[in-house]
């Protein structure tokens, strides 16, 4: 695995390194020892998959509040998404900044999102699937989010919005 920094403190892009031969390829996408050697501390608790039917759909911007804050690693398994992470850590030098990147099923890059970030994505193709490696167990009592179109955070989405859940529409504006 190759880990690259982003402009946001602690937010990383992980590029798997496939081993290819005449049969095809083999790729390791999760190894705690290798992640630790690359400077990423991550304890796996759950693995989830979402499938979104329509391009332009938004899922997000989600996070869990402390003490159940969650780190995650996300990867696109089918199609393509514009994946976004927003730094909500008040003590961070990149507080209130967001970073987005295209994740797709061709290059299989992954996004490492530390605790204290909101996360979401917009599908750029129909039938997009996203794999989530979760560093904390889901706990609905600590579930939270910020609105996808919050005027302070000002995320710029690449496509017109086609669908979004009522829960995601009802998240409040960001309150520092």
Image (cartoon, rainbow, N blue to C red):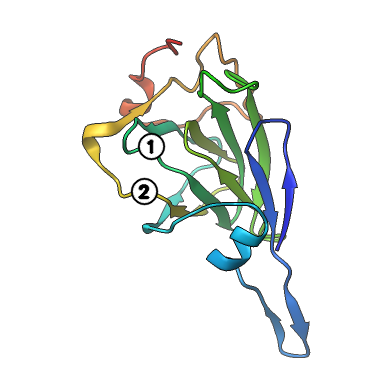
Name the image quarter holding the N terminus.
Answer: bottom right
- The x and y percentages for residue 142 are 27, 32
Front residue (pair 145, 160): 145
Secondary element under disc 1, as helix, strand or loop, is loop
Q: Is residue 30 visible?
A: no
Q: Is residue 142 left or right of residue 1?
A: left
Which residue lies under the disc numbered 2? 136
Q: Residues within 10 Å of mark 2 (few under 14, many from 20)?
A: some
Q: Residue furthest bottom?
A: 22
What is the quadrant of residue 33 in the picture? bottom right
Asked if the residue at tag 2 contacts the one at tag 1, i.e. Cβ–Cβ closer than 8 Å, the answer is yes
Dot label at residue 69: 1
Residue 111 spot, x, y in % from top left: 61, 47
Q: Is residue 166 above or below residue 120?
A: above
Residue 2 screen position, x and y as percent: 74, 59
Counting every numbered tag in the picture gives 2
Crowd tier of the residue under label 1, counting other residues whose Cα lies within 10 Å: few below 14, some 14–19, many 20 or above: some
In the rendered structure, the answer to whether residue 63 lies left or right of residue 153 reads left
Q: Residue at x 66, y 60 (%)?
A: 108
Q: Mark 1 or mark 2: which comes first in sequence? A: 1
- Locate residue 104, reporting x and y percent: 65, 53
């Amino acid at each position: 695995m190759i880990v690259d920094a982003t402009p946001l403190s602690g937010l990383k892009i992980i590029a798997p390194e496939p081993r290819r031969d005449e049969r095809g390829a083999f790729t390791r996408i999760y190894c705690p020892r290798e992640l630790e050697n690359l400077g990423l501390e991550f304890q796996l608790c759950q693995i989830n998959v979402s499938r979104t039917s329509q391009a332009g759909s938004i899922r997000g911007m989600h996070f869990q509040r402390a003490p159940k804050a969650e780190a995650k690693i996300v990867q696109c398994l089918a199609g393509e998404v514009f994946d976004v992470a927003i730094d909500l850590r008040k003590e961070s030098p990149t507080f209130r900044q967001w970073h987005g990147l295209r994740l797709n099923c061709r290059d299989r890059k992954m996004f490492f999102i530390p605790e204290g970030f909101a996360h979401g994505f917009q599908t750029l193709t129909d039938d997009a699937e996203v794999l989530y490696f979760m560093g904390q167990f889901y706990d609905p009592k600590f579930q939270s989010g910020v609105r996808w179109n919050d005027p302070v955070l000002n995320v710029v989405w690449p496509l017109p919005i086609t669908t979004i859940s009522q829960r995601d529409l009802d998240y409040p504006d960001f309150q520092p």
